[in-house]
Image: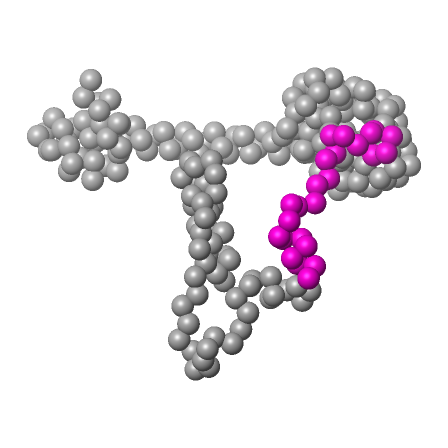
Amino acid sequence: RLMRYAMAAMQRHLEAGHKTLPLVVPMLFYHGNRSPYPFSLCWLDEFADPVMARKLYATAFPLVDITVVPDDEIMRHRRVALLELIQKHIRQRDLMGLVEQLVALLVKGYANDTQLQSLFNYMMHTGDAARFNTFIRQVAMRIPQHKEKIMTIADRLRQEGHRNGLQKGLQQGKQEGQRLAALRIARSMLNDGFDRDTVLRVTGLAPADLASESH
């Protein structure tokens, strides 16, 4: 519990805009029946294997740097090779060099529909839409037996993306409409002689919004 509180305090510190972690002291205040305090004060002792916990959490974390792993080695990772290749090369402007590798993995059966959907979704959100469409077409052309499945998954993701974008747009439009209504009310109240603090409190506007109305 103390570590959870400490982590939460660190998270709030970062969310406030700070770039480094603060030192948070997880101090325990004890007033129990047994005296002196009879338990360990090291949170690592709470693990089933405290020795292993110390090795894991008291040193630098293990690292899997996919950027330095050769593509040939990644191809041997079978069912995770698909995602690893894309993660490694997603920032390249030209993904066409990965078409043959992806085709090889699909032909060998190292990707099911769920993995393909995850892969395409990842590409859509982290890459370029035009490149994504070209990439999908090139893959589908090379493996006709999987073409319908690939295009169906890609189309479904595009539709979901369009629907999510539309919903986001509607929400933004609704919020902007509410803001404009609040500005009209504020303008009317100011014209009627209400003071700024009262107008801000009633409308919920920010001082900057009200400042723009006074110009």
Question: Residue at 52% of width from left, 30% of height from top?
Answer: 166
Q: Is residue 46 above or below residue 38?
A: above
Q: Is residue 6 above or below residue 19?
A: below
Q: Is residue 63 above or below residue 123?
A: below
Q: Is residue 164 above or below residue 36?
A: above
Whether residue 110 is visible = no
Q: Is residue 95 left or right of residue 47?
A: right
Q: How many discs mark residues in the rendered view?
A: 0
Of residues 36 and 141, which is closer to you in this image?
Answer: 36
Whether residue 124 is visible = yes
- Placement of the C terminus among the 4 image quadrants: top left
Of residues 157 and 211, which is closer to you in this image?
Answer: 211
Q: Position of residue 49 (x, y in %)?
A: 69, 64
User: Which residues make up the magenta segment?
Assistant: 51-74
Any magenta on residue 38? no
Any magenta on residue 70? yes
Q: Residue furthest right?
A: 108
